[in-house]
Amino acid sequence: MTANELAGAMQRHELLEDPAPPAAERWIATFLDAFGTRSATIDDALREVALLRAEATMIPALELERLRNRQVVFFLDAVSQYVDAQAELRDLPLASDIPAIADEFGIGHADAFAAVRMALTGRTEGPPLELLFPLIGHERIMIRIGAVSSHLLHGRGLEPIAYGPGGVPFETIQPQKPPDAERGS
């Protein structure tokens, strides 16, 4: 699918004004970088566009449980503050910035990326966060992270479930000792 095809479909579904402003053209180009190979049809692409533009996202219950941890809530809040401080979300060095933020809270790097992705998309897989951040935008990122934090803090609180499906003991994302502490420094 081309940028023109997607823009036309978005205009027909009243998801984009006509003519498309330059910022929308950049957004579509980023969308195609992120989802072009993942969206087989225009309808698939339009579903993804709608999910990206939604104010909130649905997070599967067990995935939300994985986030039910004080350090994860603080980490996600710090990511939200990081996003708020950025003038532009394109080309952010997330490969180094997210791990740096995670280290402050003792969150493993893979868990940190997984937590951010889950909070923003409700999914375990998808395009790189470097492409998702500008697609979702400042406001929606902060709203989505805020909604997850609020749900965790004001729902059942931070006490995770003890057992998952099949009676298997359930574990949330666990904080790790800082690398310096492991060396005895």
Image (spheres, rainbow, N blue to C red):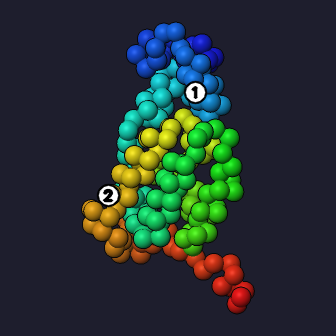
Q: Which three-letter amino acid code belongs to the residue tagged 2?
A: His
Figure disc tally: 2
The residue indicated by pointer 2 is 151
Where is residue 166 drawn, in percent x and y? 37, 68
- Comes first in the chain, label 1 or label 2: 1
How packed mark 1 is, by other alpha carbons closer than 10 Å (few <14, some 14-19, many 20 or more), is some
Query: Residue at coordinates 27% horizontally, 66% vertically from top-left?
Result: 156
Tell me the element at label 2: helix
Where is residue 158 drawn, in percent x and y? 35, 70
The residue indicated by pointer 1 is 27
In space, the residues marked 1 and 2 are separated at their CA atoms by: 30 Å
Q: Residue furthest bottom?
A: 184
Quadrant of the rendered structure where residue 55 is? top left
Tell me the element at label 1: helix
Query: Residue at coordinates 63% horizontally, 43% vertically from top-left?
Result: 130
Q: Which three-letter amino acid code belongs to the residue tagged 1?
A: Trp
Residue situated in front as seen by the camera: 169 or 179: 179
Where is residue 143 drawn, in percent x and y? 40, 46
* Up/down of 168 relative to 91, above or below: below
Residue situated in front as seen by the camera: 179 or 58: 179
Can I make out residue 125 in this image?
yes
Q: Is residue 48 left or right of residue 176?
A: left
Q: Is residue 158 left or right of residue 6?
A: left
Which label number is shown at residue 164?
A: none
Query: Residue at coordinates 50% horizontally, 38% vertically from top-left?
Result: 136
Residue situated in front as seen by the camera: 22 or 85: 85
Query: Residue at coordinates 71% horizontally, 88% vertically from top-left?
Result: 185
Q: Do residues under tags 1 and 2 come within 8 Å of each other at their CB atoms?
A: no
